[in-house]
Image (cartoon, rainbow, N blue to C red):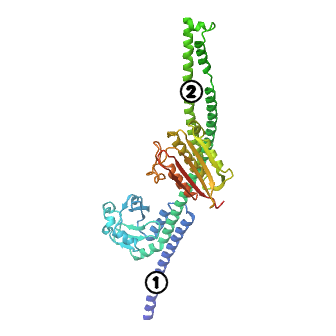
Amino acid sequence: MNNSITSAEELYETLIDLENERVISRKINQESDNLLKGLKLLVERFNEKNILVDIISILRDIVGCEDIIIMTTGLNHAFITKAATSDFFYNIQLEPQEFFKRILSGDISISFDVQSIPEWRSLFNKLNSQIKSAIHIRIGFSEKDTLLICFDSRLNFFNHAHADLIKRYSTLITQALINISSQEKINALNKDLLNKARQSGMADVAISVLHGIGNVLNNMSISSEILHEKIKNISLTKLSEFVDFIKEKPNEKNRYFIENPDGNKMLEYLSLIAQQANAEKLDLLEEITSMNIHIDHIKSVVSMQQEISKPSNVRTKAAISTIIDSILTLQNNKIAINKITLVRHYKDELLILTDQYQLEKIIRNLIQNAVDSLIVCNNMDKQLIISCDADNDENIIIQVIDNGLGIPPEDINKIFNFGFTTKNEGHGFGLHDSALTAKELGGELKASSKGLGQGAVFTLTLNNSRF
């Protein structure tokens, strides 16, 4: 009989063990199924940001708690909710104190009463009905400080088995965060590329428009020069000579204009017409001269905008003389009107391998400054000298020399500083930018002057050894 009792007890214990194994097996199967669901989400829904909510929802089912949130640090270092199983948690923000700092150092915390945690204490009145106990764990996401927090409204709900389960599952959450971050970076890069493509398209349109405007301005400039010549050549001196002749030669034919009152009035009238016509001619010539200056200014601005829109950082073979001559063409009217003597000293065949557009920008700025200085100076013999030559070290040396206003000794060391200018309407950027651009081209820009009224010399040295 004792044997049958022993056998019955052993059978009972065996049944209990078997049931425990079944329970454990069901839990393992359930956990495995949920892990597979999480992996499937990572693989199939890589591009969806709400994948994080779906994964923590699966974790919530595995753990059996009521809510799970993921918090990351924002711009002001406070923790904000990145994903949550309940919308309630999206409106909270927590300042990290000692408790959160301890969790971020690697600890995991099972809290039986959330009211004891300093970070949550300020929100406890709002959360009292929602949360009692919690588990806090750091997620190994390197880009930001990240916390995974599981909540439940039951006191003492969580235990170490929950903590171990959350640790194992946190790998999927980390991967989900990495996927989301990668997709955000890809989206940002795509947006940046799209913006650059749009800007490139706008630049192409701008170049086309500027080219059209440039053609119109060239035609206007030609028409203005023709009109200037025609007005200048209108012969009004013969009318004045006719009046003078009658006054000086009182013969029978012109006695009517001298002795007859009506004839005398007509002579005075002709004299007034001659004076007025000459005055109007001078006014028209002055207006056309002013208009030509404005046209040159607009052409210079258009040309500058065209050059800015052109591709940069591309080295090409360029002829120095061609670059200088094309820039001087834009200054022809100013040089002629202000009676500036232009002297060129350079070799036509001198070539350089460089970023042509950047080099043009430097030379244009130097020539423009020299012309402006000569216009406002009181020197009667205004001279602008452009020279270019190569030295024995394969350096190309370009000089822009004028006998204009000059540079005071106290300003010579500040001439290339950003914001420094000696012009009333200057912005202090041109020479600063030119000096920086010269360095980018592997060269150097220097300035010298004997002082006020003594003109200035700007020397651009470029290495041409790679040509």
Question: What's the distance in space between the residues labelled 2 and 1, CA to CA?
Answer: 115 Å
Residue 438 vertical position relative to residue 381 in the rendered view, above or below: below
Q: Nearer the viewer, mark 2 or mark 1?
A: 2
Q: Is disc 1 placed on a helix, strand or loop?
A: helix
Instruction: Identify the residue at horizontal 68%, vertical 50% (top origin).
Output: 348
Q: Is disc 2 placed on a helix, strand or loop?
A: helix
Query: Is residue 135 rendered to the left or right of residue 311?
Result: left
The N terminus, quarter of image: bottom left
Q: Which residue is the site of mark 1?
A: 17
Query: Is residue 70 rendered to the left or right of residue 211?
Result: left
Q: Nearer the viewer, residue 189 or 372?
A: 372
Toward the bottom, the furthest residue is 2
First in sequence, mark 2 or 1: give its number: 1
Instruction: Identify the residue at horizontal 49%, vertical 75% (top origin).
Output: 26
What amino acid does circle 1 point to? Asp
Q: Which mark is residue 54?
A: none
